[in-house]
Image (spheres, rainbow, N blue to C red):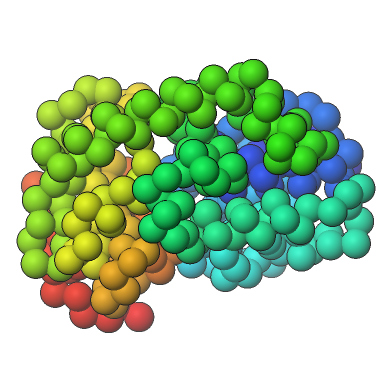
Amino acid sequence: MKVRRIVTRPDFDGIVCAALLMDVLGIEAPVYWVEPADVQNGKAEIRAGDVIANLPHDRRCSLWFDHHYTNRPETPFHGAFALAPSAARVVFDHYRIRFSRDFTELVDHTDRIDAARLTEEEVVHPENHPYVMLSMTVRNPDRDPSYWDLLVRLLRRSPIEAVMDTPQVNARCEAVSAQNRRYRKLIETFTEVRGRVSVTDFRSMNPPPAGNRFLVYTLFPEAAVNVKVHNHHRDADKMVVHLGHSIFNRECRVNVGLLLSRFEGGGHRGAGAATFSKEKADDYLPRIIEAVEKNEPNE
């Protein structure tokens, strides 16, 4: 079987997956960056020879690697699936002895970042923690495939110190630090706490603001889960809902990935997202918020 192209999503886990797969499979072509919803609704152009990582399975691909609870395979496939902290971990464990260099440190940090196993110090001062800071430069709404491809090449061949010293990365880090400072104020303005649930509603802002997604957990420590709502950054007729367990207040008992699978979304037990038509918002959104407010186990 000849693998010709890597297909993954533009987040830090997806970028690390691409770096690992390029190294072990010897692929040099640019990555095909897609969203999970594009795969789910058949809009992604998947073909034979593609290796998909960190996305739902598509029967047309040749290899598939993933770790999301709601993407558990129901049919035979080539590749690997596990409920691991990151998709990068699934790839790393599958090809462990075949890499050209030691990626252990990179994958360990990817696990912590993707599974949100961060300390409050790392959340409040990410600039002091290279891997955390680097992950925050990967902004999905920014739609910059050339930067994502650059990170894949750098992480494939260079230690983190060299990656962070790259001018393009350094400039991104400075921009993100400034963005995080603005984002903190916006979270404080647009977030309402309802018992153990914080609801951040950015639908009045276009484009939706980006920033440190973990800050909300430090600003509203009484909340065990955050619901963030915003307009889709590319499709004016759609909106996006993100759910995330607090990484410091561990009282949420709802499997949010499973919950959102009922609303055209999915994800992990502790974090997930759903994208749907705005005309469904009055139906979907209250039901989603009610489910996390009740905090009843749904597994």
Drawn side of residue 200 relative to residue 26, left or right: left
For residue 259, which quarter of the picture? bottom left
Q: Residue at x 52, y 54 (%)?
A: 113
Q: Residue at x 61, y 54 (%)?
A: 110
Residue at image coords 16%, 52%: 199
Task: Identify the image quadrant of the C terminus.
Answer: bottom left
The answer to which of 244 and 129 lies nearer the viewer is 129
* Picture layout, residue 147 above or below residue 275: above
Place of residue 135 in the rendered image (x, y in percent of width and height, measured from the top left)? 53, 41
Residue 18 rendering spot, x and y as whole percentages: 70, 41
125 displayed left or right of 72: left
Q: Is residue 15 something that shows in the picture?
A: yes
Residue 209 placement (x, y as % from top left): 28, 30
Task: Locate residue 13, reporting x and y percent.
Answer: 59, 48
- Residue at the image point whose x is 51% and y is 28% from the top: 173
Front one among 74 and 68 = 68
In the rendered image, which quarter is residue 33 located in? top right
Q: How many marks?
A: 0
Q: Quadrant of residue 188?
A: top left
Note whether 99 is above or below 6 in the view shown.
Answer: below
Vertical relation: 19 (above or below) 286: above
Image check: 126 left or right of 167? left
